[in-house]
Amino acid sequence: MAARARRRWPWLLAAAVLVVLAAWLMSFGEPEPIEHLPQVRLPTRMSEPEATRAANRRTWVAPVVDVDAGVLAPPPRRRDPVLAALPPQVHRVAMVAEVNGILNSELGPLLMDCVGGGELQGVIDEFRDAGFDPLTALDRIAVADDTLLLSGDWSKVDPTRLFGKALRTSQDYGPNAKIYELQLSDGGFDAVTATWKGQMMIVAQDRATLKATLDRLDGTGPTGPSPIDEGQAYGELYGIVQRDAFSDAFGKIEPRLGDTIRDAASSAMLHLDVSHDVGLVADVDSVDAQKGEELRRTLGAALSVARVKAQASGDAEGAALLDLARVRAAKGNRFRVEAGLPNELAVKGLKECAEKRRESSRRRAERRLDGGAPAAAAAP
């Protein structure tokens, strides 16, 4: 399997959950008279099925550490191994995507067509050949800065088929893990990867980061609270975005807004629901109440200006969508941003995205054929 595709496919799957937001923006195209958009379910709290899911995932227990004689150790607390593996401190982002839930949702097949199309299907087929079917065996993808965790059934994977010529060395690490060093280009090692208990694959940029993750899972290294609490594990995408990453994302669109976020915000906790409609909730924490209120008013004004522009241009659909976006009043140093995309418009946008991707693939194929035509004609 091509090393480039092998390196890229988890990020494509993780990005799938964000495509619906792009579909939302793309839907602000041709004006289309509408009277009313249905209300969208927003992920504001953990549902009963999500609470049951979280409880079933509490399978990890930190190994018991010897204590002095006569000192009674507290009973170990069961935790979700994916959340336990995340570093206590993240500099930019810690995010979890419920890949299995997304792929089996109503929007899942459309997301696949939009994000990857035939190219992604080819990568999936190659993973299947190595003993891992991403569509059935992959549960979640978690990103913590430069570390990638993929939970699922890795017990039947053949590393030599999975990594191919990129695999350089492998070694056991601790009682539960095996580390693989990958060289994906000329020079030094580009990535180090490990499997843990056949339940998780971890990809990191260096051995120290990878070993620190494995040490947390084996209880042999420093531990601390996860950046994502188990009570925050709801929606199909959830996690924390720190100030710099938050401001960079908006700064690419509006530099002054990015500067305001960098000055006022400390982090944002995101929850995205794509089970039927698309609902987004962002709880933004500010450095203090005054700057938080200024940022809240700035974001609210930006939404109002966008709504007025949509109405002035005759884009009734865009204006109605912006009516679903809200910046809620602050509580202390925290305020909430909400946005929604009804199912009908999500389906429409994703179908258009998939069609554009198919058309782009068709044009690339035609260019390859045209590029080979002169050489074929010159052949004797």
Image (cartoon, helix red, strand yellow):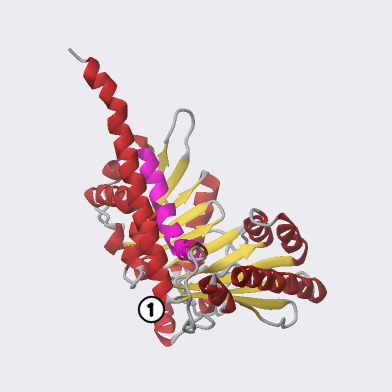
- Span shown in magenta: 1-24
- Quadrant where the C terminus sits is top left
- Name the image quarter holding residue 136: bottom left
User: Is 4 a magenta residue?
Assistant: yes
- Quadrant where the N terminus sits is top left
Of the pair 241 and 71, the residue shown nearer to us: 241
- Residue found at x 54% / y 80%: 74
- Magenta span main SS: helix
Where residue 319 sits in the image (x, y, percent)? 57, 74
- Name the image quarter holding residue 367: top left
Residue 189 to residue 62: above or below: above
Of the pair 1 and 71, the residue shown nearer to us: 1
Residue 150 to residue 59: above or below: above
Query: What count of labels does the image hold?
Result: 1
Q: Is residue 310 left or right of residue 83?
A: right
Q: Can see residue 362?
A: yes
Q: Can see residue 219?
A: no
Where residue 250 sits in the image (x, y, percent)? 65, 59
Where residue 61 sits in the image (x, y, percent)? 45, 71
Of the pair 272 and 165, the residue shown nearer to us: 272
Label 1 SS? helix
Crowd class of label 1 (few under 14; some 14 to 19; many from 20; radius 10 Å):
few
Q: Which residue is mark 1?
A: 56
Where residue 255 sits in the image (x, y, percent)? 71, 55
- Residue found at x 32% / y 51%: 358
